[in-house]
Amino acid sequence: MKDMKKSALNLAVCASLLGAVSFTAQAQENNNNPQENKLETITITAQKRSQSIQEVPISVATISQERFNAIFSSGDDITALAVKVPGLYAETSNGRAAPRFYIRGLGNTDFDLAASQPVSIIMDEVVMENVILKSFPLFDVQAVEVIRGPQGTLFGRNTTAGIIKFDSVKPRQDFDGYFKTSAGSLGMLNVEGAVGGGLTDALSARVSLMSNYRDDWVSNSFNNEKDVMGGYEELAGRVQFLYENANFDALLNLHSRNYAGTSSLFRANLLSPGSNKLNSNYDRDSVAYNEGRNNPQNYDAWGGSLKLDFVFQDMTLTTISAIENADGGGIGDIDGGNPTGPGFIPFQAVTEDQLRDLKQVTQEVRLASDSNNALSWQTGAFYFDSTFSVNSIDGFFGATEVFHGNTSWAVFGQTSYKINDKLDITGGLRYTDDEKTFYVGQQNVNGFALVIGVAEEQFYAPIRVSDDNISWELSANYRLTGTTSLFARASEGFRAQSIQGRDVAFEAPPSVADSETITSFEVGAKSDLLDNTLRLNGALFYYTIDDIQLSAIGGGTQGNQLINADQGVGYGFEIDFDWRATPYFTVGGGFSYNNTELQDDTLTVAPCGSGMCTVLDPTNSDGQAFIRGNPFPQAPETILTLNGRYDFPLESGEIYVYADYQLQGKTNLFLYESAEFNSDNNFEAGMRVAYTNYAHNYEVGFFGRNITDEDNLKGAIDFNNLTGFVNEPRVLGVDFRMSFY
């Protein structure tokens, strides 16, 4: 019945959209002032230069400030970006602390705090490498760019899938600021604001602050404790100083975060054998934990960057020096329940993970020519150094601490040449040297398994691995007409070797994955149509990944071993559009199709350790599943996203209605395929109704996220029972914003 309701709602949304398009197309014909309809030019920095999105030979999607404010109106974390952009997905089994991103189906399901990812997060021109750094909260954001495909030339290693790039609002001489607050269901109370302006004729500053709060709303039925999980309190701030004169700019960025909340809520046996549907054991408002102290987590992060620009006659020298720090951890009842239910739980599992003393230092230097000439170029060097430890505490084996180190350096160059008024070509190279180290500090300290003799102290020799690589790109942009351009791009990217030491805590050796390299081809078109009222961009892509890095997670021990498959292949397309149908109605969105396949005739992984799932892959004599031909894990085959806004002008301002909708296609959760661990046709919808007063620069509105309160399976744990975790619940609220100029 619920599936029928989902299908009916999906059809209703599409029918409503078609009806609105038909209505507004007619309205556009009668519009007497087409100038007001034109879409604004979008400027991006995907190539570390300010360029029109229509001129860059890369598939790039942006999120406007209006869409951004709507998506994050309920205080969601960075994973709220999932399926908001065609080809982009995100999920996590670590609460608001360690997101995992996927672009064009390529990502990494590794849940460890030391996991590497092929999607790079760039915040204010600084790479956030560790998964905890990637979760820094988003506020006072100026621009969001989703850059699809390998970006190995300008951004370097670990960008084989692409980049998500965030830029904060920068200081300026003119005084401006805003104050925003929202309150709603689940005890939500969010406050955000910023103020900035000139301190002297050359120096300006901006201070941005954020506070997100939600009450605990999930009860623990095992202990008869009401409303003890699901909440969070997060504080973050940013201070920026910008010094400007004719030939020199300096931007100092200092930021900090303090977070305390609940980790992901694992729900025991919420699936039944043979089905991927949530069963009667599932209750969104309740779990039954006998361990894990109700899954708390706490993280602190702080850092700073200094960007210097030296302007010469026809070139600019830029240096960016940055340091990032993080510390914290969390604990979880991993089996999702207790011995008496719900369902059968063969043994208890609780794990605590602590990230200690993370320190990341980066330095970039680049020299760029004036881009107004026919020939433009940029060249530079990059240095990266990171150290941290991960302490894993298991209720049976005890505590183990491992140490990770990573040093990398690179030199790069890119040049573009305008052959004529219609054709530009771009080429680039990057040489990268990467070294990782790993050693065990202590193992199974105070473990019960050690006391009773089930476990014993092991000696694992330190690990040091290194590799180097040359990444490249070649692209062309051809202006077919004054409003349409075609592009083609070939590129090769590189994800450095990885070391995974989590299994040391469970009497298993660390694992190492060799470097992976991706070769990608794409062609696309970008158009401004209907007198610049319709922007329609699309791309077709095909890529192969040699020695694709995978995380074999699960089996009887819930192991986390790194492996390499011979090859991974992906192909598909994405379409993005924005249409200002009338001065009062805009609609946008897009669609993506990703077909991914693992190609390795002999590679096997352990399927669910509980034996409760229905494995669909062939198995060998040891019960290991062959994964050849399977899709990449957590890679939605399709993504549909739609959004629309209708304005009702008033004498004092306007009332507008904004709505968005996302539909996620078939998604396999693990490397192996089973009847249980997959999802299809998941969707969410949001809306906002607001009044804007132009004279006094304020806005007041009502919003809803996941307004139909969908229960969507997001992930699972497959070693003990049929444990899973789900999406965020419906949140309704009101908000108020006032701007100052």
Image (cartoon, rainbow, N blue to C red):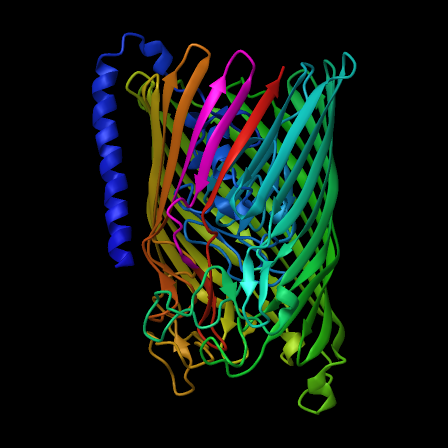
Residue pictured at 25% horizontal, 17% vertical = 28
Q: Is residue 228 left or right of residue 709?
A: right
Residue pictured at 47% horizontal, 35% vertical = 70
The quadrant holding residue 316 is: top right
Residue 604, given in percent of the width and then of the height, sits at: 43, 76
The quadrant holding residue 126 is: top right
Q: Quadrant of the N terminus?
A: bottom left
Q: Is residue 70 left or right of residue 536?
A: right
Residue 682 visible: yes
Residue 578 visible: no
Residue 403, given in percent of the width and then of the height, sits at: 73, 65
| 526, 733: nearer the viewer | 733
Majority SS type along the magenta span: strand
Residue pictured at 48% horizontal, 71% vertical = 268
Please tell me how many numbered marks the rendered image carries: 0
- On whether residue 738 falls in the magenta region, the answer is no
Q: Is residue 529 left or right of residue 633?
A: left
| 485, 166: nearer the viewer | 166
| 739, 407: nearer the viewer | 739
Residue 714, given in percent of the width and then of the height, sits at: 44, 58
Q: Is residue 27 above or below residue 302?
A: above
The residue sitting at the top extreme is 32
Residue pictured at 42% horizontal, 46% vertical = 706
Residue 334, given in percent of the width and then of the height, sits at: 56, 71
Q: Which residues are magenta?
A: 685-713
The residue sitting at the bottom extreme is 453
